[in-house]
Image (cartoon, rainbow, N blue to C red):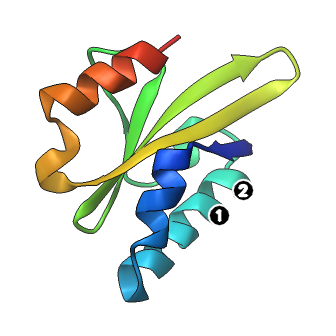
Amino acid sequence: MKVEFSKDFIKALDKLSGKIHHSIVEAINEVIDAPRIENISNCRKIESLNSVYRIKIGSKRAFFVLHVQIDGETVKFEYLVSRGEAYDKKNIERLRLRDT
């Protein structure tokens, strides 16, 4: 799959180091190599949104929007937040604005 990153996602990833940073990079590589969304481990669709998914990576949650195009699929990672912040009303509303 084709992968893109928002500025917020890159900024959050740059703040991390060590094992969690390595785990997130591995998860991104798994998304790139996955032929379909169903092949990504620890990935679930957010029920109240159409094209938004999350990947659970330790204590972090990576949210992404899946855009299906005629020539393939593009995954855009929007946010990387801690588990406590993941389902905050503010974050869900920001994801809703990016949902297709």
Q: Residue 43: which quarter of the image?
A: top left
The quarter of the image holding the N terminus is top right
Dot 2 corresponds to which residue? 33
* Residue highlighted by disc 1: 29
Circle on res. 78? none
How packed mark 1 is, by other alpha carbons closer than 10 Å (few <14, some 14-19, many 20 or more), is: few
Query: In this image, 60 relative to 21: left or right?
Result: left
Q: Check disc 1 and give the amino acid type.
A: Asn
Q: Residues within 10 Å of mark 2 (few under 14, many from 20)?
A: few
Residue 43 visible at all: no
Which amino acid type is marked by label 2? Asp
Q: Are marks 1 and 2 in contact (CB under 8 Å)?
A: yes
Q: Nearer the viewer, mark 1 or mark 2?
A: 1
In the image, 52 versus 4, the foreground residue is 4
- Residue at 61% over, 52% down: 31
Given the current orientation, which residue lies at the most extreme bottom position? 18
